[in-house]
Image (cartoon, rainbow, N blue to C red):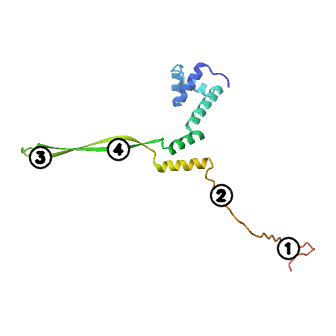
């Protein structure tokens, strides 16, 4: 791939942020008055198109988990190294006596609930499923089916009458 100028590369990098060509041209240092035209011209440049396509492919590849990443995740889940976050609400109840409008002492209860996020190991069912998937990935669970087949094979081919006339007449 041919080399881009520094300004073209800056345009490409800015364009990849939000895919707004005019704003990318302005951020890359092109004049705001001519940014739209410069952006249109840059996007028709083959070198710019190749660079943008290459960078987008790299971004796309980074978003998709590869085989090693999946196996690492399943292994960590099976070993219960992965943590789940759950919300636990603790409640505290306080009672006190306070006078009401008539001066009579009344019991008042104040209840305070506090949510907390707590990390716990992955559930056993998740760990078991991860172990099962890992076993399948490594071929540990091959289901063997034994079949004892005893059958006769008869093939009958009917070519029609033994008539040598070759005609298709009716009998």
Instruction: Say the numbered circle drawn on residue 160.
Output: 1
Q: Secondary structure at mark 4?
A: strand
Q: Nearer the viewer, mark 4 or mark 1?
A: 4
Q: CA distance from mark 1 to mark 3?
A: 109 Å
Q: CA distance from mark 4 to mark 3?
A: 32 Å
Instruction: Say the numbered circle drawn on residue 88.
Output: 4
The one nearer the camera, 156 or 10, is: 156
Label 1: how many Cα within 10 Å (few below 14, some 14–19, many 20+): few
Q: Residue at x 60, y 47 (%)?
A: 137
Residue 87, x across and y down, in percent: 36, 43
Which numbered disc flags the more N-terminal residue, 1 or 3?
A: 3
Q: Secondary structure at mark 3?
A: strand
Q: Quadrant of the C terminus?
A: bottom right
Q: Quadrant of the rendered structure where residue 84 is? A: top left
Residue that label 3 marks? 106
Q: Secondary structure at mark 2?
A: loop
Which numbered disc flags the more N-terminal residue, 4 or 3?
A: 4
Label 4: how many Cα within 10 Å (few below 14, some 14–19, many 20+): few
Which numbered disc flags the more N-terminal residue, 3 or 2?
A: 3
Residue that label 2 marks? 144
Which numbered disc flags the more N-terminal residue, 4 or 1?
A: 4
Q: Secondary structure at mark 1?
A: loop
Label 3: how many Cα within 10 Å (few below 14, some 14–19, many 20+): few
């Amino acid at each position: 791939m041919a080399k881009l100028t520094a300004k073209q590369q800056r345009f490409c990098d800015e364009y990849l942020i939000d895919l707004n060509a005019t704003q990318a041209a302005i951020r890359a240092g092109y004049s705001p008055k001519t940014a739209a035209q410069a952006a249109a011209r840059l996007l028709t440049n083959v070198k710019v198109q190749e660079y943008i396509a290459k960078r987008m492919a790299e971004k796309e590849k980074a978003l998709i988990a590869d085989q090693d990443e999946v196996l690492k995740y399943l292994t960590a889940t099976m070993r219960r190294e992965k943590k789940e976050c759950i919300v636990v609400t603790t409640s505290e109840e306080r009672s006190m006596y306070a006078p009401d409008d008539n001066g009579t002492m009344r019991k008042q209860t104040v209840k305070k609930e506090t949510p907390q996020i707590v990390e716990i190991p992955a559930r056993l069912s998740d760990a078991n499923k991860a172990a099962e998937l890992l076993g399948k990935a490594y071929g540990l669970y091959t289901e063997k089916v034994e079949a004892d087949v005893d059958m006769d094979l008869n093939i009958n081919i009917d070519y029609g009458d033994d008539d040598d006339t070759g005609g298709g007449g009716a009998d």
